[in-house]
Amino acid sequence: MAMPPILRWIVPLAVVLAGCSIPPKPDAPTLRTEAPLAGVPTQAGQSWPAADWWKQYGDAQLDALEAKALEGAPSLNEASARFGTAEKSIDIARAEAGVSIDGNAQFQRQRLSETGLIPPAFLGFTWYNQADLGVQFRYDFDFWGKQRAAIEAAVDEVRAAEAESAAAVLMLTTAVADTYFGWQADQARLALATALVENLERNRKLAGLRVARGIEPPDTVHAADGQLANAREQKAAIVGSAQMRRAALAALLGVAPAELPELEAKPLPAVAGGLPADARLDLIARRPDIAASRWRIEAALRRVDQARAEFYPDLNLTALAGLSSIDMDQFLTTGSRVFNVSPALHLPIFAGGRLKARFGASKAQLDAAVAQYDSAVVSAARDTATQALNLQQIDARRVERAAQVAATEALQDAAQARARRGLTDDRSVLAAEAQLLQQRDAATALDAQAISADISLTKALGGGYRFEAPPQTDSTQSVSQAGSR
């Protein structure tokens, strides 16, 4: 559609006038391209987690729990609601842009005032009918990209919400796995605690017999009673821990504890996790929380463009076609046709303070988004380094604990050999057995810590998430190609 002649010189003049107060376009921020993980040991050949990372443990029970949790856990509802809200914002932004067509039908009956500007005596009637039927067309010329920026910002906010949903899924799946293996560790420790209680009960019986025969002083029985009570207390604590973990699993799955399927005790799996060699460069693309922060920056950049476009003149075209008549018999005739074409130009001359405030607020939101992104990267690096070093420390402790278990097993074998030859009584055998049970309990606790640390490292590495970088445009090129700070 050709521009009306009057607008051919008004538009350039308006642009010149508006250009006097338009703020300069801010430079795109420089963002980190790698996580600060220098000095943290990596493991050659270690791969990144897969999307279904929990299947690496080879536990069908865990697979079923994860599937149940992902079906509709309460913790995912909020993330889903945020994603749905963000999607609706795209529809709103698109609805406000481009062409709009409205239909209008109206009928009214009105009485004229006898003392009004045009008396009924002059017109020859007091009451009259008015009927209108028409279609209105409106088109906003988005010369400065304001509406386009609003749509792009809404799209980026949807992508940020999608990344946040992925972060919620990762939190849920890691919590389920950690709680499940904590329950398995409780079952293994409960078996050891039960055996220790039985061992100390036999020791208490022997001590009672020796005291009754006058071989040992009564203090021997008191000491045995104290040891037995302590072992029973530890067993009760493990039983309570297992019950609480079942309740926690039920809550994560969104069911009542009674509805949780029966779980079978299984040996704890072996773990051999570590930090991938390319963690410094690839961690930013693997963490959903960092991806969400990155998309928030993109949305904030678009909001800045939108606020800056407000300074430019706004040109729109309105057209109307329809029928209008006060004579209902003539309403559908050609003489009742109504046409109207109305180009309009809006120039914000005396709104500079309000527009500058909006532009300043959009820049502040951009700065906040950049600061949040930097904080997310640093926090992710700290979390990853902590979990990797923790797993490394636990592995070292497990090696030493295995040596202690082996030494204690040798002591038990020696005590049993002496007892078979009649050199000692059963007390030394029971003492060696109790010490071995305690060492195995400590080793099981370390194994559980290793699995928990491995799951935490999987979470720190993003749990199989992969961030797709936004396409480069004139306003985002420097963000996408930014170097490290």
Image (cartoon, helix red, strand yellow):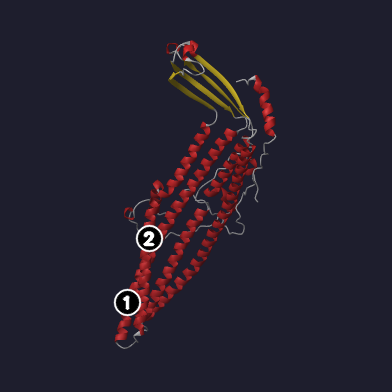
Q: Where is residue 345 in the image (x, y as percent from the top left)?
A: 62, 27
Q: Which of marks 2 and 1 is in front?
A: 2
Does dot 2 land on a helix, a strand or a loop? helix
Say few, some or many: other residues with alpha carbon within 10 Å of mark 2 (under 14 / 14 to 19 / 20 or more): some
Which numbered marker is on residue 202?
A: 1
In the displayed structure, would residue 362 be above or below residue 262? above
Which numbered marker is on residue 53?
A: none
In the displayed structure, would residue 373 be above or below residue 449? above
Give the camera-side residue of 125 and 41.
125
Res 282 visible: no
Disc 2 and disc 1: Cα gap in Å? 31 Å
Is 215 on the left-hand or right-hand side of 287? left
Q: Residue at x 49, y 40 (%)?
A: 86
Q: Residue at x 35, y 65 (%)?
A: 239
**Could you tell me the amino acid type at mark 1?**
Arg
Res 68 visible: yes
Does dot 1 land on a helix, a strand or a loop? helix
Q: Where is residue 333 in the image (x, y as percent from the top left)?
A: 46, 11
Which numbered marker is on residue 244?
A: 2
| Number of marks | 2
Q: Quadrant of the N terminus?
A: top right
Is 260 on the left-hand or right-hand side of 84? left
Say few, some or many: other residues with alpha carbon within 10 Å of mark 1 (under 14 / 14 to 19 / 20 or more): some
Q: Looking at the image, tell me whether mark 2 or mark 1 is earlier in sequence order.
A: 1
Q: Residue at x 37, y 76 (%)?
A: 227
Q: Position of residue 116 (x, y in %)?
A: 49, 19
